[in-house]
Image: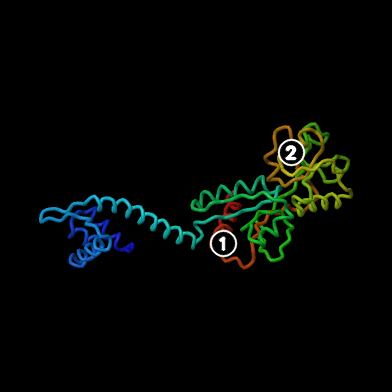
Amino acid sequence: MIDFRQLDLFVAVAEELHFGRAAARVGMAQPPFSQQIRRIERTLGAVLLDRTSRRVSLTPAGAALLIEARHLIARRDRAIDTVRRTSIGDAGTLRLGFSASAAVGLLPLVVRHVRQNMPGVTLLIDDRDGTDIPAALRSGALDAAIVRAPFSADGLIVETLLRDAFVAVLPVTHPLASEHEIAVEDLADSPFILFPRSASPGFHDTVISLCAGAGFSPDIVQEANAWLSVVGLVESGLGVTIAPAMAASACPPSVKPIALTGSHKRAELALASRKGDHSQLIARFRLVARSAVTSK
């Protein structure tokens, strides 16, 4: 059996076709270098090099070994590089969950920054109901998740990434659509379209709380699991919604985001991961996610 060190020596002489130059290339004296090459030939039971006083050339067996040796050495080097990069968080697979209400705005920004700053990382995106995410994080089915706060944090680390103002989102045909700002109570008589609570419990409860603070309970006529579906229903004139300003910035021209006055509540997006997870990949991801927010 020959080892990688011997393969390195053989490749050196096979490429140099000169024992003196090959020995110098690998930092050895020529006599022990030549002994190692003869040992490889004895181990394999094949002559790898034709040696004369004037020249060194590869035999067919040597040419075949050179091809395989280069492949093996390249695989070894890739494996070593992958292990090293994984140990510092620059390689590996990261399973990132997100709730529906986080899909617009921050998620694309974070994904873009991961691709730019962690090119060796395979990012697997997992769209889940908000109620499923805590259990998936604790079980290891997810490594991290972008979620709406408040969020169940038992056994998890939850770090706020972004606080965003709420806005009303109205169809342009709505009587209030021409206003620059309105109060939450101005929406009391309008039908509402919201994410179901199962999709984003914290966000759903915050919107209900906003309305309750303004003295009314919203008339929810339709629920939709995706932000684009919510916007489409608003655009059709079916109702209005309340959303974070970042998400509402992506509305089509037929839908109008309007600032809300009199409320100090903020929509919070957070990054959640398991307590006790000392993975350098997760630690590096947290840094990249924070930098994505500060760069926007």
Residue 18 picture location, percent across and down: 18, 56
Task: Return the mark for residue 283.
Answer: 1
Residue at the spot of label 2: 231
Q: Residue at x 39, y 58 (%)?
A: 76
Task: Return the mark for residue 268.
Answer: none
Q: Nearer the viewer, residue 251 or 96?
A: 96
Residue 62 picture location, percent across and down: 25, 53
Q: Nearer the viewer, residue 234 or 59?
A: 59
Could you say whether the residue bearing mark 2 is in a helix, strand or loop? helix
Q: Nearer the viewer, residue 288 or 7?
A: 7
The answer to which quarter of the image holds residue 94 is: bottom right
Outermost residue on the front side: it is: 45
Residue 216 picture location, percent across and down: 89, 48
Left or right of 59? Residue 117 is right
The answer to which quarter of the image holds residue 182 is: top right
Q: Residues within 10 Å of mark 1 (few under 14, many from 20)?
A: some
The answer to which quarter of the image holds residue 175 is: top right
Q: Residue at x 67, y 58 (%)?
A: 136
Gap in angstroms between the C-alphas marked 2 and 1: 35 Å
Q: Residues within 10 Å of mark 2 (few under 14, many from 20)?
A: many
Q: Residue at x 62, y 68 (%)?
A: 276
Could you say whether the residue bearing mark 1 is in a helix, strand or loop? helix
Residue 33 picture location, percent across and down: 21, 64
**Three-letter code for the amino acid on which mark 1 is drawn:** Ala
